[in-house]
Amino acid sequence: MKLPNNNQAILGDKLERYCLNNQHIQGKHKALLFQKRLGITSENKEILE
């Protein structure tokens, strides 16, 4: 599923700093979900960009 107006989305460093960071207090659970369910880590985050 594509996001509408995805060309206007600005993620900045939030992916690395929060969503894909397994050391972040709140983000580590999201990082685990991204890794286990989608196979996405900070190593291959380009998939999301």
Image: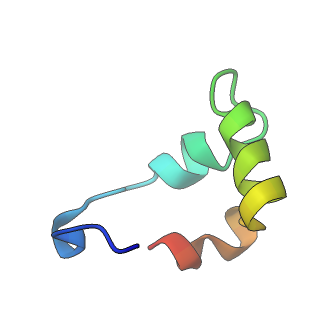
Residue lying at the far front of the rendered structure: 1
Q: x and y percent of residue 10 in the render? A: 27, 59
**Figure quadrant of residue 47:** bottom right
**Above or below 31: residue 2:** below
**Above or below 16: residue 49:** below
Q: x and y percent of residue 49 in the render? A: 44, 73
Give the residue at x 55% y 78%.
46
Looking at the picture, the colour scheme in use is: rainbow
Q: x and y percent of residue 45 in the render? A: 61, 70
**Above or below 27: residue 42:** below
Q: Nearer the viewer, residue 30 or 45?
A: 30
Q: Quadrant of the N terminus?
A: bottom left
Q: x and y percent of residue 21 in the render? A: 70, 44
Give the residue at x 69% y 62%.
42
Give the residue at x 57% y 39%.
18
Residue lying at the far right of the rendered structure: 36
**Above or below 42: residue 23:** above
